[in-house]
Amino acid sequence: MNQNPFKDKLYNHTQPVKENVWERIEANLHRSEG
Amino acid sequence: MLYERFSPLLMSICRRYVGSANAEDVLQDSFIRIFQYLMQYRNEGSFEGWIRRVCVNTCIRYLEKEKRLPIEYGAEGIPEFHVEPSVLDQMSADELMGLIDKLPDGYRTVFNLNVIEGYQHKEIAEMLGIEESSSRSQLTKARKYIQRSLAATQKVEL
C-alpha cells in the first residue's frame, strides 16, 4: 500500500519553465563575473 | 546542459516551497548559486541530491528574507489525525500540490522538508534555527490543515 502519496507523486514532479528565465540567469552570472 | 536537465524539477521544488508567484525568481537564484558553488561539489552523494539541497536552501533563505517563516510555538494538545492513504492515492500530483499551496508558509516548509524531501526533525530544526519540538508541531498542524482542506472538498470526513 502506498504510505506517502505526497512523496511518491511530488518528489520527482516537474513543471515547465518559461524561456526567459535562463536569459535572466545568464545575465546575472555575467554581471557577477564582471 | 545542466539547466535544461534540472530546471523543470527545481521549478516544481520552488513552487512547493514559495508558491507559484515567486517560484521563477527563486529558481533563478537557485541556479545562480548552483553555478557559483559548482566547484564545491565534492562527488559525495548524488549530484541531483546536491542540486536539490542548494535549491531547498535557497527557498528557505528566500522565505526568511521575506519574513514569511514565522515558526509558531506551543502546539501541544493538537490531536493526531489520520487520512486514509487511498484518498490521497486517488489524487493527482497537481491536486496534492494544490493542498500544499494552501498551507501557511511555516507549515508548508516543514511539511515539504519532512514528508517530501525526507529530512528528520533534528535536521529541519538545524536548517530553520528552531527547536526540534517546533518542527514536530508544525508538521502536526500542517497535517491537520490538510485534513481540513480535504474535508472542505468532501474528500474525507472529520
Image: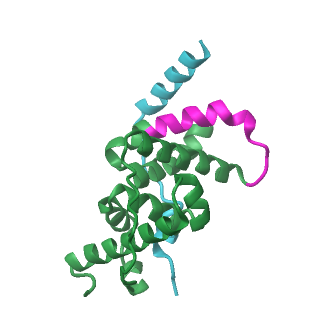
Whether residue B128 appears in magenta in the rendering, the answer is no
Q: Position of residue B52 (x, y in %)?
A: 59, 50
Q: Position of residue B114 (x, y in %)?
A: 53, 66
Q: Is residue B96 visible?
A: yes
Q: Quadrant of residue B66?
A: top left
From this view, report whether residue B153 is shown above or below residue B12: below
Q: Residue furthest top?
A: A34
Q: Position of residue B5 (x, y in %)?
A: 58, 44
Residue B43 falls left or right of residue B116 = right
Q: Is residue B118 visible?
A: no
Q: Nearer the viewer, residue B125 or A7?
A: B125
From this view, report whether residue B104 is shown above or below residue B26: below
Residue sitting at x 53%, y 53%: B129
Quadrant for the C terminus of chain B in the image = bottom left
Q: Position of residue B131 (x, y in %)?
A: 53, 62
Colour assignment, chain B:
green
Residue sitting at x 43%, y 71%: B137
Whether residue B39 appears in magenta in the rendering, the answer is yes
By secondary structure, the bulk of the magenta-drawn segment is best described as helix
Residue interval drawn in magenta: B26-45
Residue sitting at x 49%, y 71%: B136
Colour assignment, chain A:
cyan
From this view, report whether residue A27 is shown above or below residue B124: above
Q: Nearer the viewer, residue B45 or B59?
A: B59
